[in-house]
Image: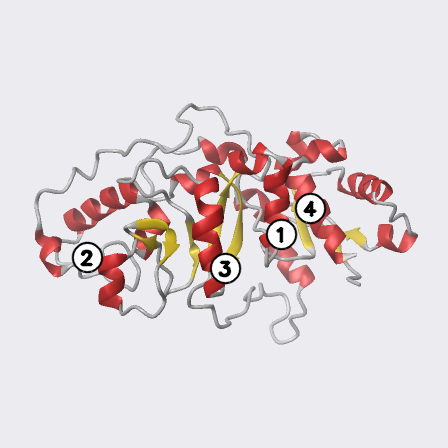
Amino acid sequence: IAPQFAEFVAHYMSAPSLLNVTKEHSLACGSADTPSEFWCYGEEDVMQAWTRFLDRNNLTDPANVACLSGVPEIAGYAEGQIYLASNDRMPGKVPDSPAPSPFGAYVAGVLVPQSWFDESEKNRKTIQEYATSTPYYAFGGATASGSDQANSLSQAHRDAGFMLYLIFTADEEANFWGNLFPKMFDISDKTNFPPVFGSNHAGFLLTGPLKEDWTKPCPRELTFEERREKCISFQEAIYGTERLARLEAIKKAVDPQFIFNCVNCVGNNLPEASKSEDDEPSPAEPETPLGNSSDEPSGASFVSSFVAAISATAVYLLSHII
């Protein structure tokens, strides 16, 4: 029943009307990239929607209905993790979740635009076809407009419906840049590369595509020097051209000696000569928004931020994965 549950969550979050679920209820729920947890704020109609979903798919076996269950009311995300986790070593303490583990050098969490996802059923099926993991549902709602323009969060975060790992292997990377990327993102302005990846879910060897052809991946056999010369940088693929320029200007103004430096951080990839240049744009000068600049939400049907999830009062679990 696990694949059906994943489909149910996708509908509940991105196309709630298919389940007779209101947008308000949909925005009150969210889920990290875990296949069996679904967090909701308040008393929602998740169980009723799950039953309707099973009815429509002729999966009305009582065992299927019963496999989704809610936990007792909890005060927040930390309490929920304590409740869910087996933590005999440190009972009553919030576990380290997820636990430390190796992270793929080239893995990439793509911030899938809600507008593209909503365009057609074909696009929704494309996601199902290429998805190799569970989507990260922590976007949408007021995140599209809830900003004073004084933070580093990329426009892609605000326009995203969800984040999805679409790059692991070299073949997947080639397919993304050559097939999916030109459809999902506006690449008409060749001087302004759009933000694509979530910075907290990107492998340390990840880059953007070739500078001369955005539909071709950066060859993985290139040296770091060759990548810097020929490929869109890790930073530009995270923040986009305009926002990265602003962040680099701020970096030079606040930390001109680059005392604070780390791999793939803003400014880390700049040539030494450019770190002392004075002709950068003013740090206070905002870039032109990539998406809708109005104060209205973009229509994304996802939880406004993971803040909603961490203050959740109900969580629904797929307790018996077949």
Residue type at the position of mark 3 = Glu
Query: What label does residue 205 carry, if any?
Result: none
Return the disc, 4 or 1, that comes first in the chain's sequence. 4
Residue type at the position of mark 4 = Val
Q: How crowded is mark 1: few (under 14 residues within 10 Å), some or many (20 or more)?
A: few
Where does residue 153 sit, x and y in percent of width and height?
38, 43
Query: What label does residue 9 carry, if any?
Result: 4
Where does residue 225 sit, x and y in percent of width and height?
22, 66
Q: Do callouts 4 and 1 mark residues in contact (Cβ within 8 Å)?
A: no
> Residue at the spot x=77%, y=62% of the render?
321
Q: Do callouts 3 and 1 mark residues in contact (Cβ within 8 Å)?
A: no
283 vs 260: above or below: above
Residue pointed to by mark 1: 129
Return the disc, 2 or 1, that comes first in the chain's sequence. 1
> Residue at the spot x=66%, y=44% of the render?
10
Q: How far apart are marks 3 and 4 (CA)?
A: 24 Å
Regarding residue 163, the answer to whether it shows in the image is yes
Residue type at the position of mark 2 = Leu
Residue pointed to by mark 2: 270
Q: Which of 58 and 268 is in front in this view?
A: 58
